[in-house]
Amino acid sequence: MLSRIQLLLCVIFWGWTFVATKVVLEHVTPVELLGLRFILGLPVLYAVIRIKRLKFDFTRKNWIGVAIGSAIITIHFLVQVTGLKYTSATNTGWIISVTPLVMAVLSYFILKEQIGARQILGIVFATVGILLLVSRGDLTSLDWLSSIGDWLVLISAHTWALYTIATRDLSRARNPLAVTFGVLTPSGILVLAYMAFTSDWGSFLEMPLEANLALLFLGVLGLAVAHWFWQEGVADIGASRAGIFLYLEPVATTALAVPYLDERFGWATAVGGLMVLGGVYWGSRRRKARTFPQ
């Protein structure tokens, strides 16, 4: 029972991170948001690892995987956060949910894993849903082609899929929570080093309470606690059963973004979102895990 509560809280936290990101981006740049999130989240994540007495027993080959994963995850975060500057949290939540199908396609080309008719049909169905989302139901107008935010978010679904593929063997060989910390730490150092020469650190102290609370949520709950809860849930009930909870992530985003950010929720969002989830569900059946990014 506890593990299911942890998984539910995890996907709610991940879904709400898109809303919190929109709030913080009103006051900082995407790079600064990422750096501040690392400052808050990594110490908490390290504390969890120490309490659980996990080891960082990485081999030289493992460290190569950590370096590659760190490079990809840095690009992923920057692309996704930048995309959120130009699109809604609601659209982001639904578009991101297509990641399992993106992973299937990339695994076909990179890992030579088979892709069946069921997955192809799911991809087509989900793609139509995404087109409805980004065009807001008006496919006859070409204005939606210039929706840079939606396209960047879609690209971030691909970068997360690449990250998952690149770190797959590493996460199987070592504790996934330790791998997460090992991958995020170089990314945090790189981003903070850049901020040391480009950011006005004093301005961060002038942010309003709403932005500070959103940033605290992103670092502590959205990064550290959510990853901890996810690993606990997967360890207890398995990846396949835990993956079912991820279908609630875009729902959590929409449930908060519509009333809090006053974002639109019309028929195109409802139908497009359902088509994306339907395509993902159909195309991901009998797969071992479904991994949405946060």
Image (cartoon, rainbow, N blue to C red):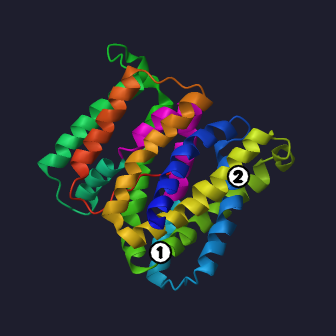
Compared to residue 172, the image places residue 11 above or below, namely: above
Left or right of 289 on screen, residue 18: right
Does the stretch in magenta take in 261? no
Please tell me whether residue 47 is drawn above or below residue 100 in the rendered image: below
* Outermost top residue: 140
Q: Residue at x 47, y 63 (%)?
A: 230
Task: Residue at 46%, 24% (x, y): give it.
Answer: 265
At numbered mark 2, what does the secondary structure look like: helix, strand or loop? helix
Crowd rating for badge 2 (residues with CA inside 10 Å; few <14, some 14–19, many 20+): some
Q: Quadrant of the N terminus?
A: bottom left
Inspect this view and state whether residue 239 appears: yes
- What amino acid type should be assigned to the residue bearing mark 2? Leu
Residue 85 included in the magenta stretch of the image = yes
**Residue found at the far front of this picture:** 1
Q: Which quadrant of the view contains residue 144?
A: top left
The Cα atoms of the two marked residues, 1 and 2, are separated by 31 Å
Q: Which residue is mark 1?
A: 64
Q: Which residues are magenta?
A: 72-98
Instruction: Using a 10 Å C-alpha cutoff, classify the residue at mark 1 as few (fewer than 14 neighbours), some (14 to 19) or many (20 or more).
Output: few
Residue assigned mark 2:
216
